[in-house]
Image (spheres, coloured by chain):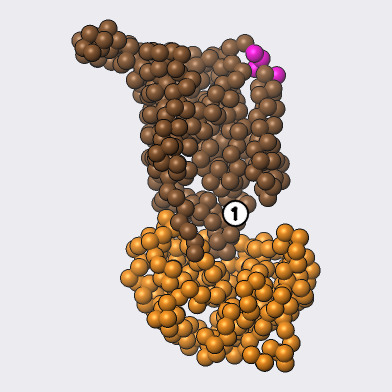
Chain colours: A orange, B brown
Amino acid sequence: MLRLENVSVDIAGAPVLRGVNLAVPPGGRVALIGRNGAGKTTTLRALMGLLPVRGGNIVVDGQNCTGAPAYRRAALGIGYAPEERRLFGSFTVLENLRLPAEVLRLPQPEMARRLDLVLTLLPELRDFAPRKAAGLSGGQGKMVALGRALMVGTRAVLLDEPFQGLAPALAQRYAEALARLRDALPDVAILITESSPALLRQLVEQTFVIERGEILDPADALTD
Amino acid sequence: MMEWLSDNGLLLGLAVLDGLASAAAIFMVAVGLNLVFGVLRILNVAHGSLYAIGAYTAASLTAAMVAAGLPAWLSYPMLVIAAALVGVILGPLIERVLLKRVETQEPVLQLLVTFALFMILEDVQKLIWGVQPVSNETPMQLLGTVDVPFGADVIPFTAYQLFVLPGIALLTLVGLAWFMRRTLTGRVIVAVTTDREAATSQGIDAAKVTMLTFTFGAALAALGGALASPMTSMVPGIGASTIVLSFAVVATAGLGQIEGAALAAVMIGLGRSIAVYLEPELEVVIPYLIMVLVLLVRPQGLFGVTETRRI
């Protein structure tokens, strides 16, 4: 479904990703583990087309998307929930959820179906729906960001450190939501980044470890 | 006090009417400047040139229309047509050829580029329209004057400045606020303004939205100029004074504010015109005095919101 082939990315002239190879199969649950600054966020942003790639290929559904404009990723069915949520504060939660579906010009019934699905998977969003996104707490915002990613992410969702900064009770609820997601939408691939693998053990099938912009050999990575 | 009022009351009334009319034109320019800054994060100094070119174009089109023997009422649609032409021709040209290239550069460089463009357009304007004052009287004459009752007296005031100009500005204010909040295109512009990268991840083609918004902002500046053209005479330098004024309005209101810009335009328009009638030396200083006073108390502007921290 998603494949990075030998991808290198520089930020401000410094190499951040060095020949990253990573594959997420259709419906696969994959974790990308690494310390702060290892290149997790950069990997996801490169996948989303938000950063220029110096070398290598980004392949989505067998299609080379390396140079394709970033805004087309949503139409390919890829949803992205960045670490800092990045909701539109002046919009309500419902408007935030609907925006990507409206931009893609989804027909009204399809939009309603997806919204319903998101609200079933993340029932707490029903309570926030009419509230302005700027007034949400960090944890609530993370839930909304996940919901928004699911509105277009019919093939894959990329979740950047979703547990970062969540209170334990909220982290628990978030993990439960991901488990429901896995059961309800088995075809949607999930790529999650985290700094600690412990939180994801139950949720993923495969783990990649990234260090200083390189994916470690699985044999080395197992020492954790 | 009462004595002073009876001596100067009529002047004050006239100043208020004048101030409201000029506020209407400044509002259009300022709200365009605001939109453009929102999507591009570039303070476009050449925005004032678009005002000037809009005003000159309206005058030329109206003159051509009158010369062709067309009915005088056509001079009103001509104001809007002039603005649309300037926006649609110059907007995409400036955005694509110039500003897009400096998108990722330092703000100082971007500012210099728009300043250079301003100087170029100022000369282009002199080449086309010369340095002698140009006027556009037809729209003003057609409607004549209205006697505005003011206490025991009446103030004769042009109907154009009293109704047409504030009316169109009000329509722009209401229409724009509705457009930004209720239409998908409006929300997409707000999304790109708030967070370009997040908007892109939602499937929004930010480059296209930026160009459209720039064109729209340019057309608003030109519309401000076209609407002001019947009440001023166009000379070199009107672009410069307009950009400085509309910058004062945007800074006073706070970035991203539509209704706030309208109120700030009224404050600055009134302050200026009252100064013209009472203490003409102060006219130039008043807008900045208002701006400085507001910014001392509220650095984010009257209605601006401080950016919420992301983490």
The extreme front residue here reads B296
| Residue placed most toward the observer, A19 or B129 | A19
| Picture layout, residue A146 above or below residue A135 | below
Locate the C terminus of chain A by quadrant.
Answer: bottom right
Q: In the rendering, at what x and y percent does residue B235 appear?
A: 59, 16
Where B33 sits versus A1, above or below? above
- Residue span colored magenta: B127-131
Residue B28 appearing in the image: no
Per the image, the residue denoted by label 1 is B206
Q: Label 1: how many residues lie within 10 Å, few (<14), some (14-19) or many (20+)?
A: many
Residue B62 picture location, percent across and down: 54, 19
Q: Is residue A78 above or below residue B262?
A: below
Q: Main secondary structure of the magenta part?
A: helix
Q: Is residue A4 left or right of residue B24?
A: right
Q: Residue at x 66, y 65 (%)?
A: A49
Q: Residue furthest right?
A: A55
Residue placed most toward the observer, A40 or A53: A40
The residue positioned 57% from the left and 56% from the top of the image is B196
B144 inside magenta stretch = no
Q: Residue at x 45, y 41 (%)?
A: B299
Q: Please say whether residue B130 is one of the residues in the magenta stretch.
A: yes
Chain of the residue on which disc 1 is drawn? B
User: Considering depth in this image, is B209 or A32 the residue closer to the camera?
Assistant: A32
